[in-house]
Amino acid sequence: MLFRKRTKSGENTDEENERLKKLLNAKSEMVSLGAHQIRTSLSAIKWIIKMFLDGDLGKLTAEQENLLRKAYDGNDKAINLVSEILLVNKSEEVVEKKYIFEKANIIEMIENTIFDFSGESLWRGIEIILLKPQTQVPEIKIDKEKILVVLQNLIENAIKYSKYHGKIFVAVKTEDKNIEISVKDAGIGICEESKAKIFEKFYRTENAQKKEAMGSGIGLYTTKKIVEDHGGKIWFESKENEGATFFVSLPLSR
Amino acid sequence: MSKKILIIEDDLFLQGLEVTKLKKDGYEIETAVNSVEAFKILEKMKPDMILLDLLLPEVDGFMILEKIRENKDMVTTPVIVFSNLSEDKDIKRAQKLGISEFMVKSNFTLDELTKKIKDLIGA
């Protein structure tokens, strides 16, 4: 997004970059504010329809109830859509922000992320198992906020695309110069035609759309960008309907 | 005796719906739309629970929560954050200030809110 070269006239592009950064921030704030306001209105609609459906405002005819249920579901879809918009906005904000590298305990970060998703996984009857290495994992220099997005995206995807009552294995191992994190699920997997496009911005496989209607297709794009900005690599192995394993390798020192 | 709840919410329409529902369930309700009104009420009464929005004019819900926790009479007063903010950093910040629950408005119905309140302070 930002200019890295000088213009033909030799004019420095720093000023232009600064202007673009300000524009991006303004856009991000506007989207966030607008989305929160829409979400507030949708909350009110949700509560009112529910009051009608619960009979708080008098008995409904079968036809009224049927239509109100459709309105309730439609409103919930709109709420999910707004949540997705907020998520995309947040992802862009995180990626555009300057990287701040600091020492971090990656195991602790993974444990906290698994804990944060425990409600969601429990609700779907999914067990997340962390396989830690025998030896102690050294602290690595990363941008904690951004790597947290990577961990959240990989674990959230594994939950979303797993079958109910499935198992997810998160494994960590250290190699010569790298630390490798893998997230393995036994979910819907990725079909051959989609494999080349999986990290593209806004791309979602047909299977993913069937399993989870809501989704922006920005998660893996953002994840790849953050991992590569850390000098790391991301790849995956998958068979359709058998599951997927995503691997992230990060340098132990920088 | 019915339990007292202070609702701090600047959106009058949402506030009205919350009041209607909670009064119907037998709670005594006080309302405030900003920090000034909230602290005026808190000088006169100690609620059994506070329902707190975060996006408020001038002084936000986090700052109100900090002030509430500084008051030794309200260190343990249950607070449910009821907001449309939903980012991890907001949830963690509120949790650090000692809340009982963080509920994203659009993810819950008023019935579910009332159930949570009943679990916390009783009917």
Image (cartoon, rainbow, N blue to C red):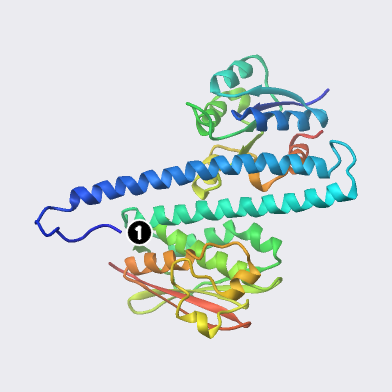
Name the foreground residue: A127 vs B27.
B27
User: Would you place residue A144 above or below residue A253 in this image?
Assistant: above
Residue at 84 percent of width and 37 percent of height: A56
Check disc 1 and report its element: helix, strand or loop: strand
Label 1 marks a residue whose chain is: A
Q: In this view, does A125 lie above or below A243?
A: above
Residue A67 shown left or right of residue B84 in the figure: right
Question: What's the residue at 63%, 17% (across, down)?
Answer: B41
Question: Quadrant location of the C terminus of chain A?
Answer: bottom left
Is residue B57 depicted above or below B102 in this figure? above
Q: What residue type is labelled 1?
A: Lys
Instruction: Residue A237: tell me if it is visible.
Output: no
Q: For this rendering, which residue is in front, B78 or A6?
A: A6
Question: Would residue A8 appear left or right of A225 to someone viewing this image?
Answer: left
Residue beneath the point at 56% across and 47% down: B86
Furthest residue in direction front, as rendered: A63
The spot of residue A170 in percent (x, y) is: 54, 72
Where does residue A126 sit, x and y in percent of width and height? 67, 68
**Residue B99 at x, y percent in the picture:** 61, 38
The residue positioned 66% from the left and 30% from the top of the image is B13
Callout 1: 10 Å neighbours few (<14), some, many (20+)? Answer: few
Please state the horizontal and vertical placement of residue B43, each as a whole percent of the image: 61, 15
Q: Label 1: which residue? A: A103
Q: How many marks?
A: 1
Q: Is residue A212 visible?
A: yes
Quarter of the image with the N terminus of chain A is: bottom left
